[in-house]
Image (cartoon, rainbow, N blue to C red):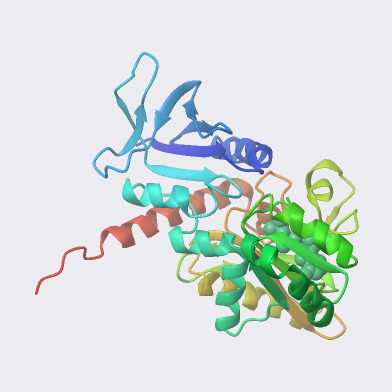
Amino acid sequence: MIKKVAVLYGGRSGEHEVSVRSAAAVMDGLKQLNNLEVLPVFIAKDGTWLLHGNRVAFLPDPNIGGLYLLEGESAGQVLTVDVVFPVLHGPYGEDGTIQGLLELARLPYVGAGVAGSAVGMDKILMKAVLQAAGLPVGEYIWFTATGWTQRKQEYVATVGEKLGYPCFVKPANLGSSVGITKAYNSEELIAAVAEALQYDRRVLVEKMLAGLEIECSVLGNDDPLASLPGQIIPCNDFYDYRAKYLDDRSRLIIPAELPPETTEKVRELAVKTFTALDCAGYARVDFFVQVEEGRVWINEINTIPGFTAISMYPKLWEASGLPFPRLLQKMLELAEERARQTASLKTEYES
Ligand SMILES: Nc1ncnc2c1ncn2[C@@H]1O[C@H](COP(=O)(O)OP(=O)(O)O)[C@@H](O)[C@H]1O
Ligand SMILES: [Mg+2]
């Protein structure tokens, strides 16, 4: 039987372009698998969903079982979908919103569910959950736009005393370094907060963590595995949007050259992070590692990491013995496994 996989890409996010590139690689890889048909669903920046130029939609009704065609010759008909593969980075894609729609529609989908996606996307909630699980995250403070307007001087003083400079200012929900600034003094801090508040109502300020930037890929559902870790060497002052996507001088070292015990610590923390955040399918966990001191800090999780053929996530699996098409195959299987688990749960209660 031919399996129909709907790949969702583009999206209403600052990471739209990155998603388009990741999806191109994913669709290329999926085409190498047998018995599989790819339905490319492009989500425009205004949120319109298009399949080959015609508007389509997933509806919350769990009996539909696929994409509802809104335009074109077959308008009004439904195209059956077996698995949905969201390749959407950032808000309205990686944050639980699409996952919620797919849960309602009862369609299997690749990656973390609603809670894992939402908490993984929100850097403030993510750190709170990781701290509660006893996992190592750096120091930070956070505030809302309203709080900042009312108590700006207080927050600036706290940053000076508690975090020091340089510090990192980030919108709570975003990725690809959009809206992130490394601030070297209080004036830059104030400008950086104004910048971050353009992207989110909530902002966090983090203490700078020195060390190597190490990333680790995780794959699985309730018994996930970690890949070998890799290292990023950014070409800029930090791994900003330019260093990630526009300038090809950033380097990846795969696998990272770490002492064996540090490699193990990273892999163990990657799995613990994945589990603490109730992720599913796959995710990439990013760290700062101080090799001499043997210290490992969790920076963040990405529940839909960059996925071009040269991105860290698939490259780490390749280095760990799992080539790109087999990785995709495994991700589809995990999606179906999770959907079966969900379907087997009781939804009615007898008194
Ligand atoms: N606390 C920190 N200390 C040192 N570098 C940081 C810190 N936070 C972020 N960075 C730098 O900024 C980059 C982007 O930050 P990150 O939190 O990973 O945001 P994104 O979700 O956009 O990838 C990191 O890859 C790293 O280079
Ligand atoms: Mg990052």
Q: Is residue 125 above or below residue 11?
A: below
Q: Is residue 40 above or below residue 183?
A: above
Picture residue at 32% right of the left edge, 62% below the top: 341
Q: Where the N terminus falls, by quadrant?
A: top left
- Residue 177, percent across and down? 74, 53
- Residue 279, percent across and down? 50, 65
Can you tell me which quadrant of the image ligand 1 is in?
bottom right
Q: Is residue 227 visible?
A: no
Depth check: give the residue in front, 169 or 336.
169
Picture residue at 55% right of the left edge, 76% below the top: 129
Left or right of residue 221: residue 205: right
Q: Is residue 263 above or below residue 220?
A: below
Left or right of residue 106: residue 115: right
> Residue most toward the front?
150
Left or right of residue 95: residue 155: right
Depth check: give the residue in front, 208 or 187.
187
Q: Which quadrant holds residue 273?
A: bottom right
Q: Is residue 218 visible?
A: yes
Q: Where the C terminus falls, by quadrant?
A: bottom left
- Residue 38, percent across and down? 48, 33
